């Protein structure tokens, strides 16, 4: 029963330890990946400038019309009955909230600035988070983040489960039933259409053009550029007008930065909120809690190796003691 | 001798077996919970299972169970390599399940890295990882069920008298 510590045994142990450590090589990969963050493009909204003319909303609609859903009717009967049909195809002209046919809308807030009642208008769309939960938690990889920080949903792959909307702190993506891949798989039992949201005109940006909403804006409300530059501009503007910033730190950082002359707590109270009408509350980093466990994942194999080594040491010691006792008894 | 060798081994791995079963159950439940199915199919309506429909909760518990599983997986491998190769032989069923679990660990590590801030894998690779990870889970559960039904063990004791 006694165990002999041979070189081969140690080599085996060493190889297993190496395998364990290889499995825990998360920090190296993470550090390499983090370098990409600086490539992200962000937009700055100077809320003071917005006049609520909806030129951006119209431009968005015109530019993205070819991406809008064209659902097949009647919709497949879905089981169980609790699965909700979400059909916006008869309400395509709704512009006062986010829908699969309206990826940008204007929120109105009546606030008090220097004792004067003022109406502010705020263009709202996807925030394009730096670490977007809609992308990271999509179970199929249908939502994706581009190197320039744009998050978009591939309508050819999305099954419309709406997990992205549930995990989005602002519940941005909107579902249209009766379209997409689920119709070709198990339309009654899995999936429910396709989720839609702003893709910040990724195809226009790829061709060196501005997103339609920025190009169409007569007041130059939005500025687009590398995230670090936009953050600097936002801080300079906030300092200049004694204003407030939203989106820089929300959900761990987004690529949509708002600068307002009034605190966002006030704006959040003043805007109409609800389905398709996102809030302006502070948002904690939703991905951080689980991601912090990545460190523990690095330590887990080390703990396993330590436990096995401890057991081996204990066994070896007890067998040596047993052998010594036998030797003494023989003498 | 054979009986003597297998009895302590059963005792040694008793706790390991329970932790293994527990982590596999939680990993499977929370893994499938990443898809929006538990609410749709009323499973989250069962008293005590409401948390299965909360994606951030299932995601967090999946990570916790993965940490426990990683520690256990490494412990069993190192313990076998260092202490047991002369006393135990891994069966084909053991190698198959071990290989599937290794695949799950590797794809799982990549998925954890994918979720970190700033990570940038190609969309095609992410789709591959998602499907590969889920495909391996289904394969593992099928293989485990087959092994339970046909009473195939992970390893068998070697006859040291020969």
Image (cartoon, coloured by chain):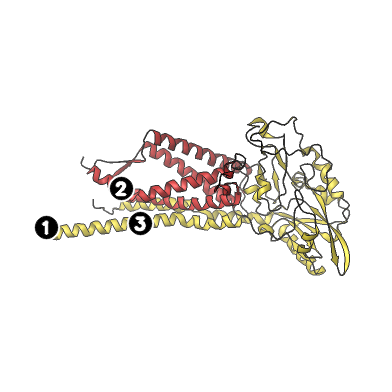
Chain colours: A yellow, B red
Position of residue B114 in the picture relative to residue A270 (left or right): left
* Quarter holding residue A244: bottom right
Label 2 crowd bin: few (<14), some (14–19), many (20+), radius 10 Å = some
What chain does mark 1 sit on? Answer: A
Q: Which residue is mark 1?
A: A330
Please tell me whether mark 2 or mark 3 is closer to you in this view: 2
For the residues labelled 3 and 1, the Cα–Cα distance comes to: 31 Å
**Residue at which label 3 appears:** A309
Please identify the quadrant where the C terminus of chain A is shown. bottom left
Instruction: Indicate the secondary structure of the residue bearing disc 2.
Output: helix
Residue A259, placed above or below residue A98: below
Circle 2 is placed at which residue position?
Answer: B9
User: Could you tell which of marks 3 and 1 lies nearer the N-terminus?
Assistant: 3
CB atoms at circles 2 and 1 under 8 Å apart?
Answer: no
Q: Are marks 3 and 1 on the same chain?
A: yes
A60 relative to B43 in the view: left or right: right
At a point 72% along the width and 58% down the height, the residue shown is A227
Q: Is residue A313 left or right of residue A45?
A: left
Is disc 2 in contact with disc 3, using a CB cutoff of under 8 Å? no
Expressed as whole percent of the image width and height from the top left, the position of residue A93 reads 84, 41
Query: Spatial distance from mark 2 to mark 1, Cα to Cα?
Result: 29 Å
Where is A264 relative to B157, above or below? below
Mark 3, other Cα within 10 Å: few <14 / some 14–19 / many ≥20: some
Q: Position of residue A252 (x, y in %)?
A: 66, 58
Q: Nearer the viewer, residue B28 or A318?
A: B28
* Percent of width and height locating residue A70: 77, 34
Measured from the top left, where is residue A166 in percent x and y?
66, 48
Provide the chain ID for the residue under circle 2: B
């Amino acid at each position: 029963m006694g165990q002999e510590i041979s070189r081969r045994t140690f080599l085996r142990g060493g190889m297993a330890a190496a395998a364990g450590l290889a499995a825990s090589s998360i920090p190296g990969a993470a550090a390499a990946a983090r370098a990409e963050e600086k490539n992200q493009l962000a937009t700055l909204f100077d809320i003071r400038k917005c006049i609520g003319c909806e030129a951006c909303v119209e431009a968005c609609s015109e530019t993205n019309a070819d991406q809008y859903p064209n659902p097949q009717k009647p919709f497949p009967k879905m089981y169980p009955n609790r699965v909700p049909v979400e059909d916006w195809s008869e309400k395509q002209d709704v512009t006062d909230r986010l829908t699969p046919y309206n990826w940008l809308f204007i929120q109105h807030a009546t606030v008090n600035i220097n004792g004067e009642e003022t109406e502010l208008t705020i263009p709202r769309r996807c925030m394009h988070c730096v670490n977007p939960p809609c992308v990271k938690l999509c179970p199929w990889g249908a939502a994706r983040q581009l190197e320039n920080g744009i998050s978009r949903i591939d309508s050819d792959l999305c099954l419309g489960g709406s997990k992205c909307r549930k995990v989005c702190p602002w519940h941005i993506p909107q579902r249209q039933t009766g379209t997409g891949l689920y119709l070709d798989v198990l339309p009654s039992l899995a999936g429910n259409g396709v989720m839609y949201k702003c893709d910040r005109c990724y195809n226009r940006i790829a061709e060196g053009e501005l997103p339609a909403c920025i190009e169409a804006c007569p007041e130059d409300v939005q500025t687009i550029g590398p995230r670090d530059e936009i953050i600097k501009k936002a801080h300079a503007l906030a300092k200049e007008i004694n204003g407030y910033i939203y989106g820089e730190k929300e959900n761990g950082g987004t690529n949509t930065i708002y600068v307002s002359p009034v605190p966002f707590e006030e704006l959040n109270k003043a805007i109409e909120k609800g389905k398709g009408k996102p809030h302006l509350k502070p948002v904690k980093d939703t991905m951080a809690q689980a991601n912090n466990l990545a460190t523990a994942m690095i330590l887990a194999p080390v703990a396993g190796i330590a436990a096995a080594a401890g057991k081996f040491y204990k066994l070896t010691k007890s067998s040596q003691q047993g052998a010594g006792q036998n030797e003494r008894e023989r003498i | 001798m054979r009986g003597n060798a297998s009895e302590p081994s059963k005792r040694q791995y008793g706790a390991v077996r329970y932790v293994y079963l527990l982590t596999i159950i939680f990993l499977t439940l929370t893994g499938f919970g990443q898809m929006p199915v538990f609410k749709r199919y009323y499973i989250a309506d069962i008293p005590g299972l409401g948390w299965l429909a909360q994606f951030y909760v299932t995601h967090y518990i999946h990570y916790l169970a993965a940490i426990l599983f990683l520690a256990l997986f490494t412990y069993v491998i190192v313990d076998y390599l260092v202490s047991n190769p002369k006393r135990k032989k891994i069966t084909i069923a053991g190698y198959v399940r071990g290989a599937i679990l290794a695949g799950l660990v590797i794809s799982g590590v990549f998925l954890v890295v994918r979720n970190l801030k700033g990570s940038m894998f190609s969309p095609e690779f992410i789709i591959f990882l998602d499907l590969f990870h889920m495909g391996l889970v289904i394969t593992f559960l099928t293989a485990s069920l087959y092994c339970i039904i046909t009473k195939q063990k992970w390893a068998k004791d070697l006859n040291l008298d020969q």
